[in-house]
Amino acid sequence: MENIFEKQLLKGSVFSNKDIISPHYVPDKLPFREKQIESITHSLSPVLSNSKPNNLFVYGKTGSGKTSTVKHVLEQLDEFVKKREMNVVSCYINCRSHSSKYKVLLKALRSLFPDKEFLGYSASFVYEKTLEYCNQKKSHLILVLDELDKVKDIDDLVYSLSRGNDELESGSITIIGISNNLMFKEKLDPRTRSSLCEREMVFDPYNATELKEILVERSKVAFKEGCVSDSAISLAAAFAAQESGDARTAVMLLQRAGEIADIEQKTIVTDNEVTKAKASVEEEIILSMVSTLPMQQQLVLYAISQMTLQKKGLKKVTGEVEEGVLFSGEIFETYLELAKKFNERTISSRWYRQYINELEMYGLILVTNSGKGIKGQTRLIKLGFDANKIKIALEKELFKKE
C-alpha cells in the first residue's frame, strides 16, 4: 500500500525554499534599514578599541524590523571579533520567555558557560559569576534584551547590570533593550532611565512601497520562478500596510497564500490566494498582535473585551439597542480599575485617547462619534473581533505578568 506521504512528495509546489518566506527568517539584507544598521554599528564600535559601548534602547511598532536589524549587526560583530580573537561576547535574550532578573542573568551566564548548568544557584551567585567572567577574561558582554518591558523587575535588572560595570576592573556589560512600547521608558525609575537610555533609536513602520520591495526580495528565493504574480505581492503589501506596516504580517500573508496555492494545486499565487490567506490568517495575526501590545494598551483592550461580554448593549433614546457598543468614558473608568488591580501606573486621559486611536488603527476596535439617539457628545467604541477570544488571549498575557 502506497505511503500517504508519497502522494505529497509527488505533488508540485510553488515554493523553492519555504523557510525564506517565514516570519522567523532573518535575511542577510535588510532593505530600508541601512541607516539603523549604520547607527547601531557606530554605537557598538567602541568595543573594537577595548572600550565599553553605550547602552542602547531601540523601540518601535511590532514588525518594524527592530529585532532583525539588531541581530544582523550582532552577527556581523560576532563574525568580525571571532576572526581577530577579540574578547567580545553577545547574548540575545527574549524577555517574554525570560521575564525576571534572575532568568535573564541565568540565560546570560549559560551563554558564557555553555557546558555548565547553573539552575538552582542563587541570583547573587549568578550575577557575581557573570562579573567574574568579564573581569577574568577581560571580556565585553553585549546583552540584547528583546521585549524588555516583559521583565517584571526591570529596574532592578538594569540597575544591577549598570552597577556591575563599576565593579569591573576590565571588560564591560552593555545592554541593548528592544521594546514595542513607545511609552515604556516613562515608567522606569529615573536612575534606570538614565543608564538604559544612553542612546535611543526609533524604528518607524514600513509603508506599502517598502513592504512590497521586502516581499519581492524574499519571493525571488522563496518561490519558484514565475510562481507568484506581481499583483499578489502588491496586495499582500497593501494588506500589511493597513495593519500598521508590519513586515511579519506581509510575509505571513504571502507564505499562507503559497500554501493555499499548493493545496489547490495551483501553479501560481494570485490575488485570489492572497485574499483567501488574509481571511485564514486574520485571527492568527490579531491574536499575535494582542500578545505583543504594551501592557497599558492590553489593559485598555481587556476593559473593552470584558465590558463587551458583560453589557447587553447601548440603548438609544429611541429604545433601539446597539450590541457591543460602549462609551469611551466608561471604558476609561474600567481601565483605571484594572490598572489598580494589576498594580500598573495609570495613564492620563490624553494617553488613553492616543491608545484608543492606535487600537483603531490596528483594526482591533471601531470608533465613531455619537450621533442621533445618543445624549451628549462622546466617542462610541466597538470591538472589531470576537470578544471572548481577545479576552482569553489577554488573560494569558496579563495573568502571566502578575
Image (cartoon, rainbow, N blue to C red):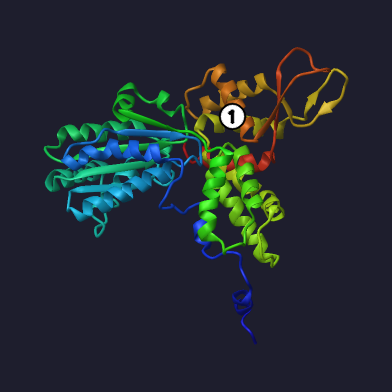
Q: Secondary structure at mark 1?
A: helix
The location of residue 5, given as percent across then percent down, is 60, 77
Task: Write down the quadrant of residue 314 in the picture.
Answer: top right
Most extreme residue toward the top is 376
Residue 26, compared with residue 350, is above or below; it is below
Taking depth in this image into account, of 180 and 323 the one nearest to the observer is 180
Name the spot of residue 173 as percent of width and height, x first: 23, 39
Residue 283 visible, this orientation? no
How many marks do you count on the picture? 1
Image coordinates for residue 349, horizontal then vertical, percent? 57, 17
Looking at the rendering, in which quadrant would you find the N terminus?
bottom right
Q: Residues within 10 Å of mark 1 (few under 14, many from 20)?
A: some
Which residue corresponds to the image point at 53% horizontal and 26% vertical from the top-left?
Answer: 339
- Check the image and name the residue furthest to the bottom: 1
Query: Is residue 355 visible to the viewer in this orientation of the structure?
Result: yes
Q: Measuring 43% from the left and 33% from the top, which residue is drawn there?
A: 59
Q: Is residue 80 above or below residue 4?
A: above
Q: Is residue 375 above or below residue 327?
A: above
Quadrant in which residue 177 is drawn: top left
Position of 63 compared to 189: left or right?
right
166 or 156: which is nearer to us?
Answer: 166
In the displayed orientation, state which residue is furthest to the right.
Answer: 318
Coordinates of residue 97 in the picture (x, y in percent): 42, 47
Q: Amino acid at mark 1?
A: Glu
Q: Residue at x 31, y 32 (%)?
A: 156
- Residue at the disc numbered 1: 358
